[in-house]
Image (cartoon, rainbow, N blue to C red):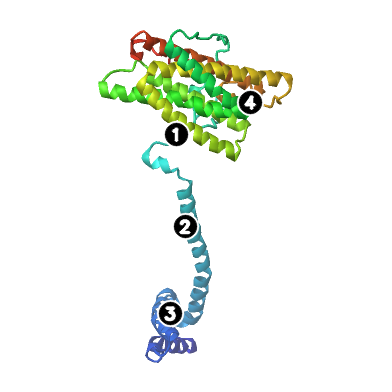
């Protein structure tokens, strides 16, 4: 009886409390919440004993609510954090369906490079003749030969026997002609609705191969600030000059590149001599070079310079061959392009 009377008093106070508690924000909140809690108490605590256990049951319900709230809050926060982490782990390009598939080496390890793939690597042909030289036969040949010899003078004065820096500078220039020639042949093919005979791809392969030479040399020689400025100036001048030259006379442009490659062979031969004599330390080969040329894991700098020199010899042959085609009054597309001939 006492419990029942007390429960009635509590319920009446809860229900009627809103009429007396409108003077403060807290009272308003209490007046709003209390009727709901009273109704919940009546519903949950009804049953055996009716409202006899109303007050104790109400206390238990409040206690369980206070214990449940932090747990539920923590679980909600964890779910939100998981969603955020999942969102951050997604690759942006996967939305478009172009994410790269997993690529591995032959031994099953993950392929670490994005700039080239395993099927683009190769064993350099070291049996190529390094001594071949195109003897100037006509006026344009002599112009090309003298121009290249003239360009070599400031290079020798500036770099002297610093063959690492010289090679780095050389490759920033050597990667330009293939790109310019391939671009102009590409535009001509579009204008004339003609095939290129594979020469677009052959020249772009040459440009990419020269760029990989540069990426390898950068791993060995860190360019100084004034060398970076020099690269900007030389590349800007050479690109525009070679672009104009190729438009005016492709035969002369390819002959110039052929002689430039002959000079590159000479420079890398001097580089190898200093490595063999101990003037330059024969450090381990960079990882990018080992994967690109399929070199042994214990390859040294000497092995890298050897394969780069062989590449330059191949580029020499390609450009002299292209110039000979033009001198015969034909177009490059009339002769099969040496695709894959590094």
Q: Is residue 221 left or right of 207 when viewed as pictured?
A: right
> Is residue 140 shown to the viewer in this render?
yes
Name the quadrant containing residue 127: top right
Which of discs 2 and 1 lies nearer the camera? The answer is 1
Q: Secondary structure at mark 2?
A: helix
Of callouts 2 and 1, which one flags the residue occurring earlier in the amino acid sequence? 2
Provide the residue designation for mark 4. Answer: 163
Assign a secondary structure to mark 1.
loop
Q: Nearer the viewer, mark 2 or mark 4?
A: 4
- Residue located 37% across and 90% down the image: 19
Q: Which residue appears farthest toward the bottom when viewing the image? A: 20
Bin the neighbour count of mark 3 within 10 Å (Cα to Cα): few under 14, some 14-19, many 20 and up: few
Crowding at mark 4 (Cα within 10 Å: few <14, some 14-19, many 20+): many
Residue located 71% across and 18% down the image: 276
Residue on which the image places disc 1: 100
Q: Earlier in the sequence, mark 3 or mark 2?
A: 3
Label 1 and label 4: CA atoms lie apart by 38 Å
**Dot 2 or dot 4, earlier in sequence:** 2
Within the image, what quadrant is residue 291 found in? top right
Q: Residue beneath label 2, please? A: 80
> In the image, what residue occupies the spot 38% across and 22% down?
246
The residues bearing labels 2 and 1 have C-alpha atoms spaced at a distance of 29 Å
The first of marks 1 and 3 along the sequence is 3
Residue at mark 3 to residue at mark 2: CA–CA distance: 42 Å
């Amino acid at each position: 009886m006492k419990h029942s009377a007390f429960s009635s008093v509590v319920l009446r106070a809860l229900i009627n409390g809103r009429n007396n508690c409108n003077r403060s924000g807290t009272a308003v909140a209490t007046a709003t919440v209390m009727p709901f809690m009273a109704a919940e108490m009546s519903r949950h605590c009804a049953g055996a004993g009716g409202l006899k256990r109303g007050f104790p049951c109400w206390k238990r319900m409040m206690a369980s609510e206070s214990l449940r709230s932090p747990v539920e809050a923590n679980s909600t926060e964890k779910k939100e954090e998981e969603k955020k982490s999942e969102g951050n782990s997604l690759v942006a390009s996967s939305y478009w369906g172009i994410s790269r598939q997993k690529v591995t080496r032959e031994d099953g390890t993950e392929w670490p490079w994005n700039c080239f793939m395993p099927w683009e690597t190769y064993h350099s042909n070291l049996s190529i003749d390094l001594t071949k030289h195109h003897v100037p036969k006509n006026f344009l040949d002599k112009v090309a030969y003298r121009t290249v010899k003239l360009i070599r003078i400031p290079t020798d004065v500036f770099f002297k026997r610093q063959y690492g820096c010289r090679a780095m500078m050389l490759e920033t220039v050597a990667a330009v002609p293939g790109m310019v020639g391939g671009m102009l042949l590409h535009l001509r093919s579009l204008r004339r609705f003609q095939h290129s005979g594979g020469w677009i791809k052959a020249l772009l392969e040459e440009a990419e191969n020269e760029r990989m030479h540069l990426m390898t040399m950068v791993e060995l020689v860190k360019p100084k600030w004034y060398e970076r400025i020099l690269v900007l100036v030389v590349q800007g001048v050479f690109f525009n000059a070679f672009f104009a030259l190729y438009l005016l006379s492709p035969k002369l442009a390819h002959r110039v590149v052929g002689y430039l490659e002959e000079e590159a062979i000479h420079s890398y031969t001097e580089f190898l001599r200093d490595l063999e004599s101990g003037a330059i330390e024969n450090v381990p080969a960079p990882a990018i070079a080992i994967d690109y040329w399929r070199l042994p894991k214990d390859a040294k700098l000497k092995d890298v310079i050897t394969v780069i020199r062989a590449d330059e010899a191949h580029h020499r042959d390609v450009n002299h061959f292209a110039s000979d085609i033009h001198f015969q009054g034909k177009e490059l597309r009339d002769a099969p392009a040496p695709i894959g001939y590094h």
